[in-house]
Image (cartoon, rainbow, N blue to C red):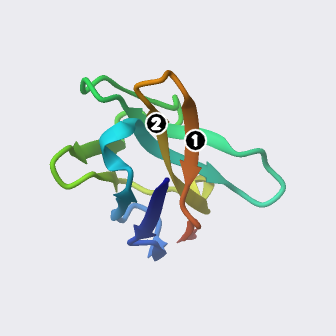
Amino acid sequence: QVQLVESGGGLVQIGESLRLSCAASGSTSSITTMGWWRQAPGKQRELVAFMTESGNSDYADSVKGRFTVSRDYAEYTVSLRMNTLKPDDTAVYYCYAATLTMFGVRKEYWGQGTQVTVSS
């Protein structure tokens, strides 16, 4: 089992920056991909960014060039640096982790979410 705890959300103005962090605990040795999803009111949850166990990463088109995902593999954390924030970035941001055991069993884990609000 993996537990994920997010931190760093809050209220910011347009153009400001914010850094989200997520710490994993439990069966951390089986974690492969970690990343961030977000969900705005009335919208479907969407993938924001992720990074694999080998360091490969990708981003949603709407955040490319503004957001940066990073991982500390020793500490089992994943962070999201969000620059030049826009009102459309307002959402609940969820930390995500995928695991793969030696037996080939895949599982997904989610944090409770942290609110990011960008005011105009």
Point 40% across, 25% down: residue: 102
Q: Which mark is residue 108?
A: 1
In the picture provided, is 4 more to the left or to the right than 119? Answer: left
Residue assigned mark 2: 99
Point 47% across, 77% down: residue: 10
In the picture provided, is 74 more to the left or to the right than 106? Answer: left
Q: Mark 1 packing: few (<14 Cα in 10 Å), some, or many (20+)?
A: some
Asked which secondary structure carries label 1, the reply is strand
Asked which secondary structure carries label 2, the reply is strand
Q: Quadrant of residue 25?
A: bottom left
- Dividing the image into 4 quarters, which one contains the C terminus? bottom right
Image mark count: 2
Q: Amino acid at mark 1?
A: Glu
Nearest the eye: 14 or 70: 70
Percent of width and height locating residue 17? 33, 63
Point 20% across, 44% down: residue: 73
Up the image or down, 59 lies above or below 16; here it is above
Q: Residue furthest left?
A: 74
Q: What is the C-alpha distance between the residues marked 2 and 1? A: 6 Å
Point 39% across, 58% down: residue: 26
Whether the residues at callouts 2 and 1 have beta carbons within 8 Å, the answer is yes
Q: Residue furthest bottom?
A: 11
Percent of width and height locating residue 67? 36, 44
Percent of width and height locating residue 32? 38, 32
Q: Quadrant of residue 50?
A: top left
Percent of width and height locating residue 98? 49, 37
Q: Residue furthest front?
A: 103
Up the image or down, 62 lies above or below 82; here it is above
Q: Which mark is residue 92?
A: none
